[in-house]
Image (cartoon, rainbow, N blue to C red):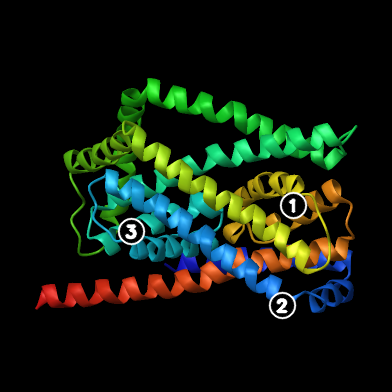
């Protein structure tokens, strides 16, 4: 736990450095001046749109959990998803680092197996890639029609989107085609690692190889159930698309609140392409995503750097800090509930 806490602290320290450098280059005073000119009703609308995004992606989780036979109400699924967002936002490497904690939160909230929670959040995160790449391609296509040449930064974004558009279907095909071989390889690789770690935990017997294999197979079986349900995939991707469009609208409205009129197509490029920076070893991509958004906004719209930075501050305030606070409260409540259940079980 101390190692996790240290990694989180170092991650936020790194994010703070990136943000300070970004705003130092742009000009802190200019960014503050732009923020003070923001239209309050439009900023409030940004917050409402961010809540809609959170609800859409929470409903995607609700849909996947339903396919796995886990009963949970829609409002609770949204709150649980906010807790998953919190874990991603405070963990280095974003979703990749936060998924194990997200799975634990889901399993506690739904009284399901950990493997089921992990399969649910992994499936939702994987499904999010499909509409994000699609929106970026649409935005780039519109931008290409209206623009004679692409700037260097937009070309880099286009290359990244193109790589994802190619890599995702290839990875899905290979993973599905060789899923049983992949499962066997994971079992062989993880069994000795899990057994070794378990031996270091005082007071607990290490699980048998058969038990570890059974739990890993349970995870893959849950993934298989989601993949084989076409209705689940269609509905979940629909909710995911609604969430992505809300994120795009949030950024567009954030610029509008500052009196900047930017093409909606530009926001279609900036949000999916800039979100790739979430893979940086920073909590929730904090700092890296902001820098990517600012650079892409300036490249695609030509607005002033201070205005672009202020728009990103408003957008990320609604889509990073708000769900982090809400999700942190939900995660704390889930932890307290789990503690009470354990104490009552001991009694």
Residue closest to the eye, 102 or 202: 102
Residue 112: mark: none
Q: Are marks 2 and 3 in contact (CB under 8 Å)?
A: no
Place of residue 24 in the rendered image (x, y in percent of width and height, measured from the top left):
86, 68
Residues at marks 1 and 3, CA–CA distance in whole angstroms: 31 Å
Q: Viewer-proximal residue, 326 or 26?
A: 326
Image point 34% across, 46% down: which residue? 64
Check disc 1: other Cα within 10 Å, few if <14, some if 14-19, many if 20+: many
- 142 relative position to 190: left or right: right
Relative to 15, is 181 above or below?
above
Secondary structure of residue under mark 1? helix
Spatial CA span between label 2 and label 3: 36 Å
Task: Report the mark closest to the observer, 2 or 3.
Answer: 2
Is 278 left, or right, of 328 in this rendering? Answer: right
Nearest-to-viewer mark from 2 and 1: 2
Q: Earlier in the sequence, mark 2 or mark 1?
A: 2
Question: Could you say where residue 3 lies in the image, as x and y percent from the top left?
Answer: 48, 64
Seen at 83% across and 46% down, the residue is 300
Q: Which residue is mark 1?
A: 292
Q: Is 95 above or below relative to 254?
A: above
Q: Is 43 or 11 nearer to us in this picture?
A: 43
Residue 176, x across and y down, in percent: 39, 25
Mark 1 / mark 3, whichever is N-terminal = 3
The residue indicated by pointer 3 is: 106
Q: Which residue is the extreme one toward the left?
A: 347
Q: Quadrant of residue 79?
A: bottom left
Tell me the residue that label 2 is attached to.
40
Q: CA distance from mark 2 to mark 1?
A: 26 Å
Helix, strand or loop under label 3 = helix
Q: How far across and how far down the image is residue 192, in percent?
A: 30, 40
Image quarter of residue 235: top left
Quarter of the rendering containing residue 74: bottom left
């Amino acid at each position: 736990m101390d190692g996790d806490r240290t990694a989180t602290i170092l991650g936020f320290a790194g994010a703070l450095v990136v943000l300070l450098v970004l705003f130092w280059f742009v000009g802190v005073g200019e960014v503050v001046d732009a923020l003070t000119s923001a239209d309050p009703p439009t900023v409030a609308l940004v917050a409402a749109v961010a809540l809609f995004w959170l609800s859409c992606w929470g409903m995607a989780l609700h849909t996947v959990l339903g396919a796995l036979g886990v009963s949970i109400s829609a409002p609770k699924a949204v709150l649980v998803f906010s807790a998953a967002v919190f874990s991603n936002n405070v963990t280095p490497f974003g979703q990749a680092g936060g998924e194990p904690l997200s799975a634990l939160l889901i399993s506690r909230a739904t009284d399901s197996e950990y493997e089921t929670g992990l399969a649910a959040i992994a499936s939702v995160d994987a499904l999010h890639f499909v509409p994000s790449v699609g929106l970026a391609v649409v935005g780039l296509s519109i931008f290409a029609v209206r623009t004679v040449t692409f700037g260097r930064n937009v070309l880099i974004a286009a290359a990244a989107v193109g790589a994802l558009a190619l890599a995702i279907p290839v990875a899905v095909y290979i993973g599905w085609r060789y899923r049983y071989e992949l499962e066997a390889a994971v079992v062989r690789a993880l069994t000795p690692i899990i057994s070794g770690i378990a031996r270091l935990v005082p007071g607990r017997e290490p699980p048998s190889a058969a038990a570890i294999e059974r739990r890993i197979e349970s995870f893959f079986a849950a993934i298989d159930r989601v993949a084989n349900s076409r209705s689940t995939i269609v509905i979940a991707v629909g909710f995911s698309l609604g969430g992505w469009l809300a994120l795009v609208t949030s950024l567009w409205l954030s610029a509008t609140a500052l009196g900047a009129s930017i093409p909606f197509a530009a926001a279609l490029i900036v949000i999916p392409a800039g979100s790739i920076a979430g893979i940086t070893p920073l909590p929730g991509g904090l700092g890296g995503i902001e820098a990517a958004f600012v650079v892409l906004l300036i490249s695609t719209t030509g607005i002033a750097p201070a205005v672009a930075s202020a728009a990103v501050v408003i957008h990320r305030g609604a889509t990073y800090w708000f769900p982090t606070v809400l999700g942190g409260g939900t995660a704390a409540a889930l932890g307290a509930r789990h503690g009470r259940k354990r104490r009552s079980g001991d009694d």
